[in-house]
């Protein structure tokens, strides 16, 4: 699972949802994540977990 941030407006071909630059959403499918990253429409958000 990855959190992705849209960097170019897009229409998600799998769901038909319009996503605008700046939107953040989660994707569970590794193949779909790779497809979106390769298309250069999203960037992966790295979460910094606080040290306890």
Image: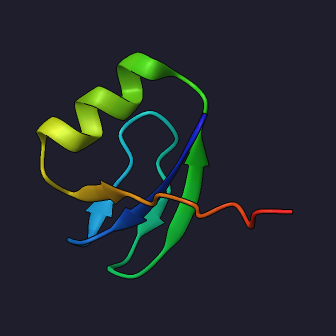
Which residue is found at the position 61% from the left and 33% from the top?
1
- Total numbered circles: 0
The x, y position of residue 11, in whole percent, is 33, 56
Decide: is 37 above or below 50: above
The x, y position of residue 51, in whole percent, is 76, 63
User: Farthest residue toward the top?
Assistant: 31
Q: From the viewer's perspective, is 41 left or right of 3? A: left
Q: In what quadrant of the picture does the C terminus appear?
A: bottom right
Figure quadrant of residue 21: bottom left
The x, y position of residue 42, in whole percent, is 28, 57
The x, y position of residue 28, in whole percent, is 61, 29
Figure quadrant of residue 19: bottom left
User: Farthest residue toward the bottom?
Assistant: 22
Q: Considering depth in this image, is 5 or 11 the residue closer to the camera?
A: 5
Q: Considering depth in this image, is 49 or 24 the residue closer to the camera?
A: 49
User: Farthest residue toward the front?
Assistant: 52
């Amino acid at each position: 699972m990855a959190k992705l941030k849209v960097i170019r407006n897009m229409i998600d071909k799998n769901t038909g949802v319009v996503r605008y630059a700046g939107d953040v959403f989660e994707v569970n499918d590794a193949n779909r994540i790779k497809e979106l990253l390769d298309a250069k429409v999203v960037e992966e958000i790295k979460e910094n977990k606080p040290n306890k």
